[in-house]
Image (tube, rainbow, N blue to C red):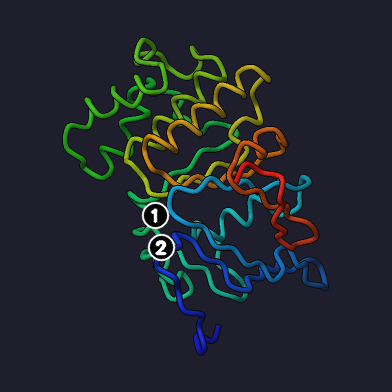
């Protein structure tokens, strides 16, 4: 991929996509999943990406986080041009500055809630890990469930543990892929409010993929991914 004439990065933006394309081979042809996407995200913003199932929303999230590499175009994450980074360098950028929340929680079933939240702190050898993990559980209303394993928790409680784990390293950016997709309506609304509250109190940029139109409308900006193109919608709360 040529690096000539790379677009100049704006330091005000925490994420930038410049004419990003993503293609995958399929039989004897190439499928265009992402086409000519441009996006600018500033620190502390809350961005929702909506679209049909299979439209490429999760792929777009992976491109922003450097989990996948664009076929062409430029992705800047936290001021770094990911095109020029090795996989180890991309992993280093993500390490303590990026958090992830998934639809299926992705908790370790053999570990307690506390141990699940402790994992990233111990991985990065962060001091006072246990007290920080307990505080994170307290912030999501689960300090009384610290010693329970995922199988002993409801779906909403499991997602709260996942949120505590994602926020405990105080990331600058949090990517959430259908964070309320497996929850009932009342629990989903509680999780939505919790994420938006933590965005405000932790000054964490939140970028989420969701099928939930009401959730998307609570965000500052909303984008529709349609036929591979990212289109800003003007009916959010921005």
Q: Is residue 199 above or below residue 228?
A: above
Q: Which type of secondary structure does the marked residue at label 2 adopt?
A: helix
Task: Work out how far the residue at label 2 is from the one at label 1, CA to CA, in angstroms.
Answer: 6 Å
Quarter residue 167 falls in = top left
Q: Residue at x 40, y 13 (%)?
A: 148
- Labelled disc at residue 94: 1
Q: In which quarter of the image is the N terminus?
A: bottom right
Q: Which type of secondary structure does the marked residue at label 1 adopt?
A: helix
Crowding around mark 2 (Cα neighbors within 10 Å: few <14, some 14 to 19, many 20+) is: some
Q: Is residue 79 left or right of residue 181?
A: left
Viewer-nearest residue: 191 or 103? 191
| Callout 2–callout 1 Cβ contact below 8 Å | yes
Quarter residue 180 falls in = top right
Q: Which residue is drawn at 57% across and 19% down?
A: 155
Q: In this view, does 131 lie to the left or right of 9?
A: left
Q: Which residue is drawn at 70% across and 34% down?
A: 212
Viewer-nearest residue: 125 or 193? 193
Can you give x and y, in whole percent of width and height, for residue 141 in the image? 41, 17
- Labelled disc at residue 78: none
Can you give x and y, in whole percent of width and height, for residue 229 in the image? 74, 63
Determine the residue located farthest toward the bottom in the rendered image: 4
Crowding around mark 1 (Cα neighbors within 10 Å: few <14, some 14 to 19, many 20+) is: many
Can you give x and y, in whole percent of width and height, for residue 144 in the image? 36, 10
Q: Which residue is drawn at 73% across and 52% down?
A: 224
Q: Report how many numbered discs are placed on residues in the image.
A: 2
Determine the residue located farthest toward the right in the rendered image: 28
Residue behind mark 2: 90
Q: Is residue 147 above or below residue 110?
A: above
Viewer-nearest residue: 122 or 110? 122
């Amino acid at each position: 991929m040529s690096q000539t004439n790379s677009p100049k990065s704006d330091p005000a933006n925490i994420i930038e996509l410049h004419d990003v394309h993503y293609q995958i081979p399929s039989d004897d042809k190439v499928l265009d999943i992402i086409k000519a996407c441009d996006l600018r995200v500033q620190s502390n913003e809350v961005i929702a990406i909506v679209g049909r199932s299979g439209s490429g929303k999760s792929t777009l999230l992976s491109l922003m986080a450097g989990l996948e590499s664009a076929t062409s175009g430029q992705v800047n994450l936290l001021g770094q041009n990911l095109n020029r980074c090795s996989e180890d360098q991309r992993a280093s950028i993500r390490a303590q500055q990026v958090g992830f929340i998934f639809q299926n929680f992705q908790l370790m079933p053999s570990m307690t809630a506390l141990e699940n939240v402790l994992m990233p702190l111990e991985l990065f050898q962060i001091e006072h890990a246990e007290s920080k993990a307990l505080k994170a559980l307290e912030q999501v209303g689960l300090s009384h469930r610290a010693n329970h394993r995922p199988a002993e928790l409801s779906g909403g409680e499991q997602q709260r543990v996942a949120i505590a784990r994602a926020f405990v390293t105080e990331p600058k950016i949090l990517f959430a892929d259908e964070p309320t997709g497996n929850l009932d309506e009342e629990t989903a609304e509680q999780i939505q409010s919790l994420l938006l509250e933590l965005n405000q109190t932790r000054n964490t940029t939140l970028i989420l993929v969701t099928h939930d139109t009401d959730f998307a409308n609570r965000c500052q900006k909303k984008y529709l991914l349609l036929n591979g193109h990212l289109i800003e919608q003007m009916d959010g709360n921005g």
